[in-house]
């Protein structure tokens, strides 16, 4: 029986929620029986009183002094219990690379995809359009062509660093490991999001194989259930 029961508040279409859900799915073996985690999942509707920024949130009144409301912090907390996610010899490199990818433009694309859905109510559409205004003004700085090109260059820079860590001949995961780290998990979702928003061309060829490999795992299938990373594609 798990010693610590948590509640994870998430939304299916929040990329940050997906990162936490897939990290837990790939958690591996616990450090010991006492540190094994049990997580109850509670879905939050981000268009009925909540925002994308409010999920995921991990709570446990007995263990946590306050809820954890950042996807990376939740990832690190899970990794304390499941050390294969953050192996000591790669810890600093993984943490540094996990900070890099930005998702603001992908968030805009997710909202756009929802607005484009046929059959949604006018009230819902207006709510989405209002959310798009917030995303546009506060998250993406207008999404000017210059900003988009900057984000593409940043993505290419990060992926060029990561691709050097991948050698499928040595093992299925980064550094030739036989089990995924937290970086593998977040990378898989980042690559999938690039595909889903029409930027697959930014993915280096070796990481295309990595992307397809992760999508064929049972862990990916259990989390995504055949869905894309964004709605409406």
Image: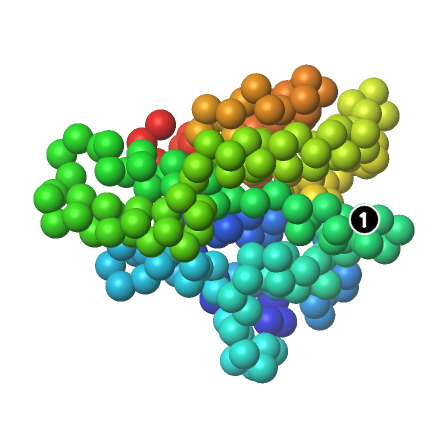
Is residue 12 at all visible to an observer of this figure? no
- Does 50 sit left or right of 28 as displayed? left
Q: Quadrant of residue 226?
A: top left
Q: Quadrant of residue 203?
A: top right
Q: Give how far across and how far down residue 162 sits, in percent.
A: 75, 34
Residue drawn at point x = 24 percent, y = 59 percent: 48
Q: Give how far across and how far down residue 163 sits, in percent.
A: 75, 29
Q: Give how far across and how far down residue 26 sits, in percent.
A: 64, 45
> Residue most toward the right?
89
Q: Give how far across and how far down residue 28 sits, in percent.
A: 70, 48
6, 134: nearer the viewer: 134
Residue drawn at point x = 55 percent, y = 62 percent: 70
Q: Secondary structure at mark 1?
A: helix
202, 85: nearer the viewer: 202
Within 10 Å of disc 1 (Cα), the crowding (few <14, some 14-19, many 20+) is: few
Relative to 17, is 215 above or below?
A: above
Say which residue label 1 marks.
93
The C terminus: image quadrant: top left
161, 1: nearer the viewer: 161
Q: Quadrant of residue 71?
A: bottom right
Relative to 122, is 149 above or below?
A: above
Is residue 141 at all visible to an observer of this figure? yes
- Does 162 sit left or right of 228 as displayed? right
């Amino acid at each position: 029986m798990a010693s610590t029961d948590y509640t994870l508040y998430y939304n299916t279409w929040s990329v940050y929620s997906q990162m936490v859900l897939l990290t837990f799915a790939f958690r591996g073996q616990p450090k010991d029986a006492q540190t094994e985690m049990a997580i109850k999942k509670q879905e939050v509707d981000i268009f009925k009183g909540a925002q994308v920024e409010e999920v995921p949130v991990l709570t446990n009144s007995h263990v946590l002094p306050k809820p954890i409301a950042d996807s990376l912090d939740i990832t690190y907390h899970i990794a304390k219990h499941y050390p294969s996610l953050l192996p000591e010899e790669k810890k600093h490199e993984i943490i540094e690379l996990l900070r890099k990818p930005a998702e603001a433009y992908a968030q805009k694309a997710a909202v756009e995809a929802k607005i484009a859905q046929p059959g949604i109510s006018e009230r819902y559409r207006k709510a989405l359009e209002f959310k798009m205004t917030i995303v546009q003004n506060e998250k993406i700085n207008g999404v000017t062509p210059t900003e988009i090109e900057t984000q593409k260059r940043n993505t290419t820079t990060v992926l060029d660093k990561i691709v050097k860590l991948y050698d499928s001949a040595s093992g299925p995961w980064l550094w030739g490991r036989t089990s995924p780290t937290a970086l593998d998990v977040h990378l898989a979702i980042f690559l999938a999001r690039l595909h889903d928003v029409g930027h697959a061309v930014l993915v280096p060829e070796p990481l295309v194989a990595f992307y397809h490999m992760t999508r064929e795992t049972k862990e990916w299938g259990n989390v995504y259930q055949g869905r894309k990373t964004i709605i409406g594609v």
